[in-house]
Image (spheres, rainbow, N blue to C red):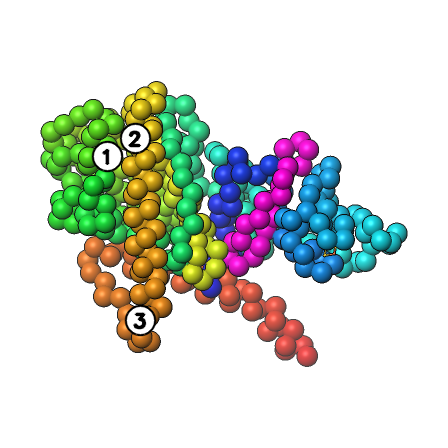
Amino acid sequence: MYVLNTWYVAAWSTEVTRKPERRVICEQPLVLFRTQDGTPVALADRCAHRAFPLSAGRTVGDSIECGYHGFTYGSDGMCTKVPAQTTIPERAKVRKYPLVEKDGWIWAWMGDPELADPADVPDTHWMTDPEWATVTHSVHFACRADLIHDNLLDLTHESFLHQSTVGDDYIYEHGITVEVEGSVVSVDRLMPSVPAPPLYADTMGISGNYDRFHCTEFFVPNLHVLHSGITGEGRPRAEGYLIKVLNGITPIDANNAWYYYAFSRNFAVDDAQATADLEVGLATVLREDAEALEAQEIGMQERPAGEFDVLIAQDGGVAKARRILANLIKREQAAAQKPAAVAGTRA
Ligand code: FES
Ligand SMILES: [Fe+2]
């Protein structure tokens, strides 16, 4: 059960080249490649002839050639060549997926192509803005995407799971403010007069107390933008050490997801050592999350039917996001069933 009419991060720009690359998104296999002028293309990764993965073939000009019997498809997904005969069967075509390349990510639209609007891709400009320095990671999480959403909407887990890097008891001691605007859920937490977390304090070169804050903005269902940082006590957030953590969450199937992660900072921008330290520290944070969520996924599968989560006040954002996600899925399914119902009436 996925929202399909949305943009999902499909890959980093650097991962898509002339060599075909396979990705599975919402249980749909895609092959990604670039045409000769560099335009990224996504087609269904399944040859119309006998379902061989096109990603195991090669690009020829602007086309992709199946590595099994040589059927060749243009960037529009239409078959242009069948080596063993001169005619091309009418059904010899594969689905083409709309793509947008922006700020270092390639986004794919998994639903009705008629509804795909590139203007709906959220703002992630910090990743390529020269005023900011960025560390990136991508990790395969062996859990349902929902658990990653919950994880990012309830950052009290940092107090326990990430003690050595970004955690501290004071996180769960401070409450949250939850706001909803359309299908965006924001969870804000201000922690006045506290020490900076060890991972940041080192790279910022600071000590003593500051106002720490983090605000998770969840663009349901595909991206969390975490506006985080520390500032002087009682001072505006904008003048502080600012961090934007971009979390592109892309379901693979019911029990797996891709996690595309970018950590952009507006301090120590030219400091290569800070970048190297953050790279290592943030890899630790992500590994701790991946291991915890994998264990939680197993717990979910072992849980008997009828036993549900016990949500608390800190889960305010989790509860709101789940409702929005469920409504988006319900609405899409209702819309998809409409034509079938009409056809049924006519019959
Ligand atoms: S399966 Fe692709 S050409 Fe036969
Ligand atoms: Fe975490």
Q: Which mark is residue 303?
A: 3
Q: Which residues are magenta?
A: 18-38
Q: Residue, x 56% and y 57% (percent of image)?
A: 28
Q: Does 120 appear above or below 68?
A: above
- Left or right: residue 244 compared with residue 91: left
> Circle 2: is it few (<14), some (14-19), or many (20+) Cα within 10 Å?
some
* Percent coordinates x, y for residue 59 in the rendering: 69, 41
Reading the image, the residue beneath label 2 is: 277
Q: Give the mark, 2 or 1, whose residue is nearer the N terminus.
A: 1
Label 2 secondary element: helix
Q: CA distance from mark 2 to mark 3?
A: 39 Å
Q: Amino acid at mark 1?
A: Leu
Marks 2 and 1: CB-CB under 8 Å?
Answer: yes
* Percent coordinates x, y for residue 252 in the rendering: 48, 55
How many discs appear? 3
Q: CA distance from mark 1 to mark 3?
A: 36 Å
Q: Residue furthest right?
A: 86
Reading the image, the residue beneath label 1 is: 199
- Left or right: residue 225 compared with residue 24: left
